[in-house]
Image (cartoon, coloured by chain):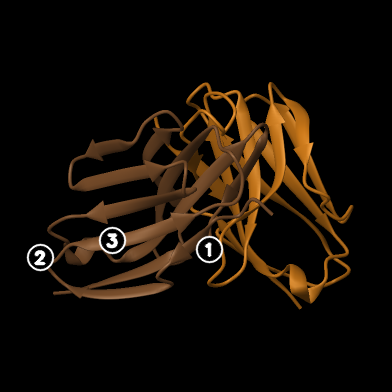
């Protein structure tokens, strides 16, 4: 399966701290995307990084991609209680599209 | 309008019932998707429609039948479901295929099969 594995499965931090979550995948990809899901709701796209990019920023989000290690990380800086959610990486290869196992982030006010 | 709507929000059905889930978007997107998500698991792709044609069917049982009446609408017809089919069903759309484009998700239909 192309499904990504995310690490850690769960993360609990204090408001204001940074949160880092990692995604590892198995085969070559076209790009890698990160999505957020609030409990029992639809997913929201956060950022897309292409296979020829190494780092990308969007507001408080920083994503890195290391294709040699087949891994990506998502850093959320200065976390807020509203960042509490599950975060999924998603990879695409050809016409296939797979979500990773997800990281559940809790930000404590 | 950057919204994907899904109806109903919740659905309870028996194993002999026939029901339909509906999804609608007015962003002019030409690709639409159905996903199934079990609790504490990632979404699993079920079907992809591209330009109103079924382009991907991820080996989904025939008791799930997708339909794309036009470029804005996507239905999922349900018949003779099993209790293990209980899950959150998510619809999404994108301008092009998901591998290159952001997907916009609806809020989902919470399905319970008794």
* Residue occupying image coordinates x 24% and y 47%: A61
Q: Chain of mark 1?
A: A
Classify mark 3: helix, strand or loop.
Answer: strand
Q: What tint does the image give chain A?
A: brown
Q: Are marks 1 and 3 in contact (CB under 8 Å)?
A: no
Q: Are marks 1 and 2 in contact (CB under 8 Å)?
A: no
Left or right of B41? Residue B77 is right
For label 2, the crowd category at 10 Å Cα-Cα, with few meaning under 14, some 14 to 19 and many 20 or more, is some
Res A56 visible: yes
Q: Are marks 1 and 3 on the same chain?
A: yes
Q: Chain of mark 2?
A: A
Q: Which residue is mark 1?
A: A101
Q: Which residue is mark 3?
A: A20
For label 3, the crowd category at 10 Å Cα-Cα, with few meaning under 14, some 14 to 19 and many 20 or more, is some
Res B11 visible: no
Left or right of B66? Residue A107 is left
> Which chain is displayed in orange in the rendered image?
B
Task: Determine the CA span between mark 1 and mark 2.
Answer: 26 Å
The residue nearer to you, when weighing A106 against A48, is: A48
Residue A85 x/y as whole percent: 35, 64
Which callout, 1 or 3, points to the residue nearer the camera?
Answer: 3
Task: Determine the CA span between mark 3 and mark 2.
Answer: 13 Å
Q: Quadrant of the C terminus of chain B?
A: bottom right
Q: How many numbered circles are shown?
A: 3
Classify mark 1: helix, strand or loop.
Answer: loop
Compared to residue B48, the image places residue A38 above or below, namely below
* Residue occupying image coordinates x 73% and y 32%: B68
Q: Residue A16, labelled with which disc?
A: 2
Which callout, 3 or 2, points to the residue nearer the camera?
Answer: 3
């Amino acid at each position: 399966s192309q499904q990504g594995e995310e690490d850690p499965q769960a993360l609990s931090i204090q408001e204001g701290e940074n949160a880092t979550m990692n995604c590892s995948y198995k085969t070559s990809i076209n790009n890698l995307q990160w999505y957020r899901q609030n409990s029992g709701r639809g997913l929201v796209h956060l950022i897309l990084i292409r296979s020829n990019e190494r780092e990308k920023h969007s507001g408080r989000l920083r994503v890195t991609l290391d294709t040699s290690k087949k891994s990506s990380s998502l850093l959320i800086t200065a976390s807020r209680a509203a960042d509490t959610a599950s975060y999924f990486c998603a990879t695409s290869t050809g016409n296939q599209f797979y979500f990773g196992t997800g990281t559940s982030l809790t930000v404590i006010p | 309008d950057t919204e994907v709507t899904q109806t109903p929000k919740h659905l309870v059905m028996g194993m002999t019932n026939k029901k339909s889930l509906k999804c609608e978007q007015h962003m002019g997107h030409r690709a639409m998707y159905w996903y199934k998500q079990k609790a504490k698991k990632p979404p699993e792709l079920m079907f992809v429609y591209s330009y109103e044609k079924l382009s991907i069917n991820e080996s989904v049982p025939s008791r799930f039948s997708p339909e794309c009446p036009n470029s804005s609408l996507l239905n999922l017809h349900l018949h003779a479901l099993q209790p293990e089919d209980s899950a959150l069903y998510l619809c999404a759309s994108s301008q092009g295929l998901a591998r290159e484009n952001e997907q916009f998700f609806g809020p989902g239909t919470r399905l319970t099969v008794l």
